[in-house]
Image (tube, grey):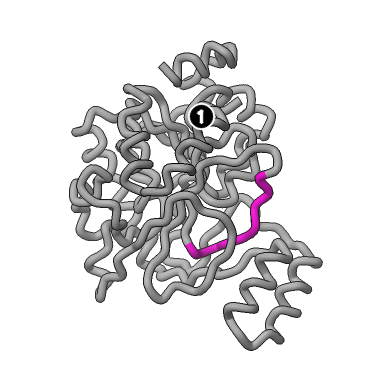
Amino acid sequence: MACLEQHEIQSLVALSNPYQQLDRLAGRLKGGDVVILACGPSLSDYAPDELERLLAGRCVMAVKQAFDVVPELVDFQILNTWNSQRYDYSRRRPFIIRETAIGDPPVFGEADLELTVARPSALSEQLAIRQNFADYTFDRQIDRPWGPGVLYEIGFYLALHLGAGRIITLGWDVGVRASSIMPHFYDRPNPRKTALLHRSMAIRSLHERNRFRHDAGVLYNKPRIIADEVDACIAASEGWHRYLQEQGVELIVVSSGSLVSPSIRRARLEDLIVPEPVAAAVQRCQA
């Protein structure tokens, strides 16, 4: 069982007004943990059943496809328009937050809180470069900065808004230095999906092509990675560490191969979290 009960998510969805939704979430955790599952290869360091045992009753935030690893435990799923796909919410539906920038390619699927990302005119305006983290807390504005990356644009800010005392990340690997390749935990050959992607190229309209890919369950809107972005994100990880520390929040990395700043504490998930009875965990989370 996840931290938010289904009726609480439905209540948030029913509000529809983004300011009211964020007000409802403000300070909810009162110093508790937020576990963020990102899509780096190290998310596979733990089997799904291990994560289910360790994270039961915790506040879990999943970046995009990380939702599929432990769908019944995810409270918040955070999306943007890149590396999109269709998700199966039949087992449990999280609260879905999606951000979009003007000019982004079309995307389909559900979202409960829609946010806008400013598109800077230069790379020097990225949050990772400027590191003006305090300017984009949700109590100041709901428009999102250009990170790059949904973890920097939404994930850490949402955890801070919830009142987290610790942010524990798994799968936050950043990428590969001096490379245009961004590895993910789900990277593996799939002939059926490759054939569907090839078939979709015959569709001339980008809108209809993306609709076909979404309905077919294949990944679409793969982004172009700028090689220097990885170094910028590595440097920004140290800035995030300092900023969150100033707010009284400890940032911890579980990922074995992460390139984030060495000043950020590394630990094993089982050393950070003592599994507790699910009923007690949920009661603590809702207190």
Relative to 42, say whether 111 is above or below.
below
Quarter holding the C terminus is: top left
Magenta region includes residue 165 = no
- The residue at 64%/78% (across/down) is 209
Q: Can see residue 257? A: no
Relative to 81, say whether 152 is above or below.
above
Magenta region includes residue 86 = yes
Q: Main secondary structure of the magenta part?
A: loop
236 or 79, which lies in front? 79
Q: Can see residue 183? A: yes
173 or 222, which lies in front? 222
Which residue is the extreme one toward the front? 14
- The residue at 50%/47% (across/down) is 96
Name the secondary structure under disc 1.
loop
122 or 30, which lies in front? 30
Left or right: 240, with 210 as reference point: left
The image quarter in which residue 198 lies: bottom right
Specify the amino acid type for callout 1. Answer: Leu
* Span of residues in magenta: 81-89
Measuring from the top left, give residue 5's x and y in whole percent: 55, 28
Relative to 234, say whether 62 is above or below.
above
Q: Which residue is mark 1?
A: 4
The image quarter in which residue 242 lies: top left
- The residue at 31%/70% (across/down) is 119
Crowd band around label 1 with a 10 angstrom C-alpha radius: few (<14), some (14–19), many (20+): many
Quarter holding the N terminus is: top right
Left or right: 259, with 53 as reference point: left
Measuring from the top left, give residue 154's x and y in whole percent: 37, 49
